[in-house]
Amino acid sequence: MDYNQINSYLVDIFNRVLVVEENSLRQSQFKDVSLKEMHTIDIIGINKDVTPSDIAKELLLTLGTVTTSLNKLEAKGYITRTRSLTDRRVVYISLTSKGRLLYRLHRQFHKNMVLKVLGDMSESEALALQKGLASLHQFLEDLM
């Protein structure tokens, strides 16, 4: 096993996914959304009753950075803020119809990418990949 080659693949894959995502956004009707904003929309789309603090924790960003991103997304019409009826200090973030459309397209983008990779693999190869990625994910979670 060549550990340097595995590391090289992981770094290269990470960088290329970011570039492909960025290019995909730039060539779409959603040119006004940055990659960071796209990932914020993704977190909001996945979760129900999400708060700015939840988003900051998930994206490993400061609350100030997330607030700036949310302000921009709200101004662009992708999200709305709603105060809790029981605790006015709590603000929930949700997607507008425009935000939901972008969320669904982003999810489809990733699904297509995964299906393309898995398409040439046997079931055992796909399970080995899944197990390896799960181990890497857990390792990174444990570091946090």
Image (cartoon, helix red, strand yellow):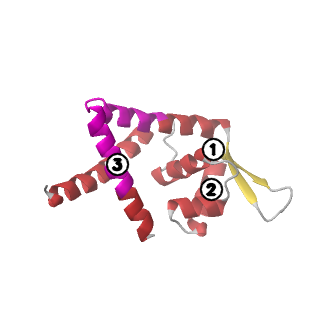
State the SS at label 3: helix
Q: Quadrant of residue 121?
A: top left
Q: Residue at x 61, y 40 (%)?
A: 99
State the SS at label 2: helix
Q: Which residues are magenta?
A: 108-135
Q: Residue at x 44, y 64 (%)?
A: 141
Is mark 3 in CB contact (under 8 Å) with mark 1?
no
On the question of residue 27 being in view, the answer is: no
Q: Is residue 122 magenta?
A: yes
- Residue 44 is marked as none
Identify the mark nearer the N-term, 3 or 2. Answer: 2
Q: Residue at x 64, y 57 (%)?
A: 71
Give the residue at the far front of this rendering. 124
Is mark 3 in CB contact (under 8 Å) with mark 2?
no
Q: Which residue is mark 3?
A: 131
Residue closest to the eye, 112 or 78: 112
Residue closest to the eye, 6 or 97: 6
Answer left or right for 67 relative to 135. right
On the question of residue 88 being in view, the answer is: yes
Answer left or right for 29 relative to 126. right
Expressed as whole percent of the image width and height from the top left, the position of residue 70 reads 62, 56
Q: Main secondary structure of the magenta part?
A: helix
Expressed as whole percent of the image width and height from the top left, the position of residue 40 reads 55, 52
The crowding category of the residue bearing disc 2, from other C-alpha atoms within 10 Å (few below 14, some 14 to 19, many at least 20), is many
Q: Residue at x 50, y 50 (%)?
A: 39
Quadrant of the drawing holding the N terminus: bottom left
Expressed as whole percent of the image width and height from the top left, the position of residue 81 reads 73, 52
Quadrant of the drawing holding the C terminus: bottom left
- Residue 70 is marked as 2
Q: Which residue is mark 1?
A: 78
Residue closest to the eye, 85 or 3: 3
What type is the residue that disc 1 sits on? Answer: Tyr
